[in-house]
Image (cartoon, rainbow, N blue to C red):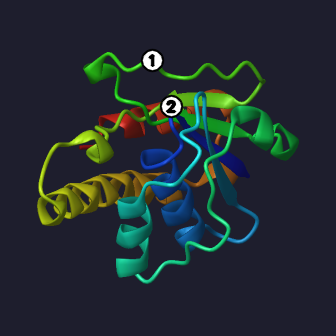
Amino acid sequence: MKFLFLCTGNSCRSILSEVLFNSRAPEGWKAYSAGSKPSGQVHPLTIETLENLGLSTDGLWSKTIDDCEQYQPDVVITVCDSAAQEACPLYLGGAIKAHWGLADPSHLDLPKEEKLKAFQVTVDHINRRLDALLALDTTHMSRPDLIAAINQISHIE
């Protein structure tokens, strides 16, 4: 299965989701990330957070949705923060779609150490959702059941 994590800037939440997913994904599963209005760079604290976790940041870059079309994702998950009235990107393909809203720690006006803690809170939130996703027995689920299960995961805080 191929997953595409989408947000607006593709510099923080979607990149974290991509790397965390790929570090844990079963064989044959792969994640990508993109943004509707890519910032053009991965946020430096995203890189620092991933490196602090011992995860590779090689080859990470801020991508557009068009850059990821070639992967033909099976599942598209938006991670923008609708609670902050942030516009979520729209994906029109036939993939399963879900929204796992996450607050954006990169926009917090805090000292660096506190901001890094906020990035770690976001990582922990993503990992709790990935725990639930990776626990699904997707080989025995119908498409409607899979859609429901992936969307239910959005309620995990």
Instruction: Give whichever of 121, 141 is nearer the camera.
Output: 121
**Which residue corresponds to the image point at 38% horizontal and 71% vertical from the top-left?**
48
- The amino acid on which the numbered mark 1 sits, given as a three-letter code, is Ala
Res 129 visible: yes
Q: Secondary structure at mark 1?
A: loop
Determine contact: label 1, label 2, CB under 8 Å.
yes
> What's the residue at 61%, 48% (across, down)?
62
Q: Quick one: label 1, few (<14), some, or many (20+) residues within 10 Å?
A: few
Residue toward you, 71 or 49: 49
The quadrant holding residue 27 is bottom right
Q: Name the residue that disc number 1 marks.
A: 87
Q: Secondary structure at mark 2?
A: loop
Q: Position of residue 20 (x, y in %)?
A: 49, 64
Looking at marks 1 and 2 on the same chain, the residue that comes earlier in the sequence is marked by 2
User: Where residue 74 sits in the image (x, y, percent)?
Assistant: 74, 40
User: In the rendered view, would you say 134 is above or below 34?
Assistant: below
Please name the amino acid that badge 2 sits on.
Answer: Thr
Q: What is the total number of numbered labels drawn onto the structure image?
A: 2
The structure residue drawn at horizontal position 67% and vertical position 23%, both measured from the top left corner, is 91
Residue behind mark 2: 8
Q: What x and y, as percent, mark residue 98?
A: 52, 30
Tell me where residue 123 appears, x and y as whole percent. Answer: 33, 59
Q: Indicate which disc residue 20 carries.
A: none
**What is the distance, in whole Å, between disc 1 and disc 2 at their CAs?**
7 Å
The reply to whether residue 148 is in sight is: no
